[in-house]
Image: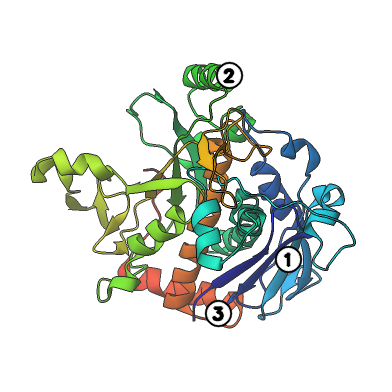
């Protein structure tokens, strides 16, 4: 048994749909928490005009009764309020109007390759689905998955590590769940106040220069049992699943766990986490980011993702008209200057979906009580207790 999520919808269409299959029956859902995660995806200094239009909410249309899951697929819809301004251009059915085609692909976007692959003459046929607006549906699904994980003692958090060349200082203390209190109140979801101010200033400078800017965010998961994932097959390795899920987020170009790429320049004696016994197996370091041999170790999971600058610029790059083949400036579309803070929230959702699926695969159970019982028996068998820090 595993968890599967499907999304549908276009950026300026009637709305987005998320279908989540594989959760047990009897899981109590918090409607406010679901909508709160959707609101968190809209946070962050550097967002554009779209966030002033949309106030996202998830309407559950199947799989839940009186706040509890029924065991079948859960369907959710996130309406696009901006559709009222796009109804003629994005109506699912033919309209009695001359709707102009878009012929100016943006470098760095799916525009050009998508028109080639799907034999489209109108770039809008591609860009609407390729838009990061789709991540609202992912966050809805991830919000349900994280409520399932919370029942099993797992908490997921994220924060921004860098924007452009502005980085948070190296940590000397290990992060705990409590360290993330108030992170969403920060304009860039950064845990260091001085760095946050520098990040905001940097975004402002880049926006005035008609630039977009990327950065990195970190997602942490606390309370995971050891042994999620497996070493026996490549597709069962939890780090492979997590890396694929994170890099599937729009504009993500790199993923690392723990010390990640820095381990390539670290001698073996300093790269691995020594094992000790203190009533249970413990490690004093977490260079591996909570994953060894494709399986969780029981230490906090630490995943970091790098996001490139957004490809829609207020001062467009050079491109080619796909109809005339003449040189042209790329499409001008409403855009954000920086979405790294929001990408961290999407990262939480994708990590939650992978980890929830891993729990379903390992522990099964048709009802949430069955899942909890199976997890408790496993913890007892291996003599494991959760660690609260990374």
The quadrant where residue 41 appears: top right
Q: Is residue 139 left or right of residue 284?
A: right
Res 76 label: 1
Res 370 label: 3
Tell me if residue 285 can be seen.
Answer: no
Label located before the other in sequence (2 or 1): 1
Query: Which one is nearer the viewer's eye here, 387 or 271?
Result: 271
Q: Which residue is found at the position 78% from the left and 58% from the top?
A: 90
**Residue 163 screen position, x and y as percent:** 46, 29
Label located before the other in sequence (1 or 3): 1
Label 2 – label 3 distance at C-alpha: 51 Å
**Residue 105 screen position, x and y as percent:** 56, 47
**Residue 248 screen position, x and y as percent:** 47, 56
Label located before the other in sequence (2 or 3): 2
Q: Which residue is found at the position 52% from the left and 53% from the top?
A: 112
Q: Which residue is found at the position 30% from the left and 59% from the top?
A: 297
Q: Is residue 289 left or right of residue 79?
A: left
Which of the two discs, 2 and 1, sits closer to the camera?
A: 2
Which of the two discs, 2 and 3, sits closer to the camera?
A: 2
Query: Which one is nearer the viewer's eye here, 264 or 364?
Result: 264
Label 2 – label 1 distance at C-alpha: 36 Å
Query: Which one is nearer the viewer's eye here, 83 or 373?
Result: 83
Graded by Cα atoms within 10 Å as few (under 14), some (14 to 19) or many (20 or more), the crowding at tag 1 reads many
Above or below, comparing residue 287 to residue 280 in the picture: above
Q: Is residue 285 left or right of residue 32?
A: left
Element at label 1: strand
Report the residue marked by disc 2. 204
Tell me if residue 192 can be seen.
Answer: yes
Label 1 – label 3 distance at C-alpha: 25 Å
Element at label 3: helix
């Amino acid at each position: 048994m595993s968890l599967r999520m499907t999304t549908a919808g276009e950026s300026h269409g009637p709305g987005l749909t998320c279908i989540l299959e594989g959760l047990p029956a009897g899981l109590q859902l918090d409607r406010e928490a679901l909508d709160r995660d959707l609101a968190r995806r809209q946070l962050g200094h550097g967002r554009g005009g779209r966030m002033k239009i949309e106030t996202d909410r998830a309407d559950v249309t199947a799989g839940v009764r009186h706040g509890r899951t029924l065991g079948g697929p859960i369907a959710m819809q996130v309406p696009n309020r901006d559709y009222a301004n796009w109804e003629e251009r994005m109506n699912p059915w033919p309209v009695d109007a001359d709707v102009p085609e878009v012929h100016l692909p943006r470098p760095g976007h799916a525009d050009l390759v998508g028109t080639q692959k799907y034999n489209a003459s109108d770039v809008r046929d591609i860009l609407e689905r390729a838009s990061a607006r789709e991540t609202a549906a992912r966050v809805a699904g991830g919000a349900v998955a994280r409520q399932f994980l919370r029942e099993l003692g797992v908490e997921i958090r994220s924060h921004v590590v860098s924007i452009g060349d502005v980085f948070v200082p190296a940590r000397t203390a290990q992060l705990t769940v409590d360290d993330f209190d108030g992170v969403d109140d920060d304009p860039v979801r950064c845990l260091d106040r001085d760095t946050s101010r520098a990040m905001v200033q940097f975004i402002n400078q880049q926006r005035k220069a008609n630039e977009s800017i990327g950065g990195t965010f970190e997602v942490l998961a606390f309370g995971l049992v050891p042994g999620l994932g497996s070493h026996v097959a490549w597709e069962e390795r939890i780090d492979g699943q997590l890396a694929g899920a994170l890099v599937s987020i729009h504009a993500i170009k790199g993923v690392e766990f723990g010390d990640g790429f820095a381990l390539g320049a670290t001698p073996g004696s300093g790269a691995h986490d020594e094992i000790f016994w203190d009533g249970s197996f413990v490690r004093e370091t977490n260079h591996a980011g909570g994953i060894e041999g494709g399986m969780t170790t029981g230490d906090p999971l630490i995943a970091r993702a790098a996001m490139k600058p957004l490809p829609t610029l207020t001062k467009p790059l050079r491109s080619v008209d796909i109809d005339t083949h003449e040189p042209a400036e790329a499409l001008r579309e409403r855009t954000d200057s920086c979405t790294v803070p929001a990408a961290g929230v999407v990262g939480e959702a994708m990590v939650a979906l992978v980890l929830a699926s891993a729990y379903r695969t390992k522990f099964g159970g048709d009802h949430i009580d069955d899942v909890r019982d199976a997890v408790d028996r496993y913890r007892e068998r291996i003599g494991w207790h959760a660690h609260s820090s990374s």
